Image: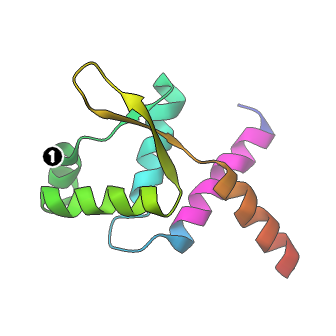
Amino acid sequence: MTEEDYQLYTDYLMAGNGQLRGRHGFRIPAVVMDQWHRQGFAVLRTNTLAKHYGVQRKTMWKTIKGVVDAGFIREVGRTAEGKAMYVPCLERGKEWRAAREARV
């Protein structure tokens, strides 16, 4: 991983930490980025995530929808099983870095 990629990924996660609402919203971009980095896309299974974070499946579904609506992840297709495939919107990290540098 190059230093530029590391900076972009870190900025993306920091933007999510500061802008996403809810108890678990900030976690979803990290989960998506991890899976995307390993396999080119992420599949968010609400049952698994809800169990892992100790919330209801519906709560996790709303959290994921909120992250999509905020523009931090986007759906790029469906798996053979019909599950949504997501990728991170890394431009949010670039926006966060530009705003941060403008303040300094």
Quarter of the rendering containing residue 53 = bottom left
Image side of residue 10 versus residue 73, left or right: right
| Residue named by callout 1 | 47
Quarter of the rendering containing residue 97 = bottom right
Residue 7 among magenta residues? yes
Give residue 43's position: percent from left, percent from top: 34, 35
- Magenta residues (range): 4-16
Quarter of the rendering containing residue 23 = bottom left
How packed mark 1 is, by other alpha carbons closer than 10 Å (few <14, some 14-19, many 20 or more), is: some
Callout 1 amino acid: Asn
Q: Residue at x 53, y 55 (%)?
A: 72
Image side of residue 73 versus residue 49, left or right: right
- Quarter the C terminus occupies: bottom right
* Label 1: element kind: helix
Residue 67 among magenta residues? no
Image side of residue 14 versus residue 5, left or right: left
Give residue 25's position: percent from left, percent from top: 39, 64
- Quarter the N terminus occupies: top right
For the stretch drawn in magenta, the main secondary structure is helix
Front-most of residues 82 and 103: 82
Q: Residue at x 31, y 62 (%)?
A: 63
| Colour mode of the rendering | rainbow
Give residue 95's position: percent from left, percent from top: 73, 62
Image side of residue 75 versus residue 61, left or right: right
